[in-house]
Image (tube, helix red, strand yellow):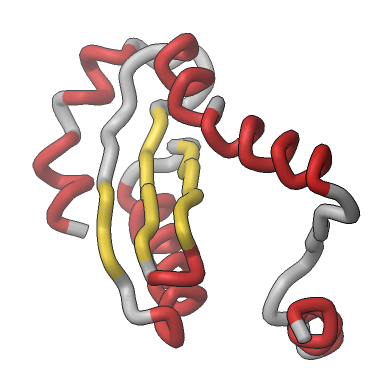
Amino acid sequence: LFESLMEDALARGVIDNAAVAESVAQSRDFWNLREHIPLAQADEGKNIKHDIGVPISRIADFIDVTDRALAAAYPDIRMVTFGHLGDGNLHYNVSPPEGHAHDAFLANQDGINRI
């Protein structure tokens, strides 16, 4: 069932890419990768974190609209979005542009949060 859902989503252009674990070991590796996203962000420097709930049917629209609005207001920022998409929980994190001073970026936190 899951694989047919993924195939349909790929065919309709809802997603661009997908990887499905073919073993328990691959499943553990995928989960390990996901668990290291926040650690990688911390190593990179400061960022603005959001832990939000979005109805599953609205996740794609939320990401599309919000990414575009943030990019228009704050050029070159980088979005890092991950989470438990099956329950609508997203970690929608915003990182500064490459080479940008982190403290100067954090001065935009109120504006970023409003979007």
Residue 24 percent location from the top left of the image: 79, 46
Q: Nearer the viewer, residue 94 or 41?
A: 41
Q: Is residue 101 above or below residue 71?
A: above
Q: Nearer the viewer, residue 13 or 99?
A: 13
Residue 115 percent location from the top left of the image: 21, 59
- The residue lying furthest to the front in this view is 24
Q: Nearer the viewer, residue 70 or 12?
A: 12
Residue 68 percent location from the top left of the image: 44, 62
Exactly how many numbered labels are in the figure? 0
Residue at 63% over, 31% down? 32
Q: Nearer the viewer, residue 77 or 55?
A: 55
* Residue 60 falls left or right of residue 49: right
* Residue 47 falls left or right of residue 23: left
Residue at 37% over, 48% down? 91
Residue at 48% over, 13% down? 44
Residue 34, quarter of the rendered image: top right
Residue 12, quarter of the rendered image: bottom right
Residue 103 percent location from the top left of the image: 22, 13
* Residue 60 falls left or right of residue 45: right
Q: Is residue 52 above or below residue 5?
A: above
Residue 29, quarter of the rendered image: top right
* Residue 51 falls left or right of residue 87: left
Q: Is residue 103 above or below residue 48?
A: above
Q: Is residue 42 above or below residue 30?
A: above
Check the picture and name the quadrant holding the N terminus: bottom right
Residue at 36% over, 61% down? 89
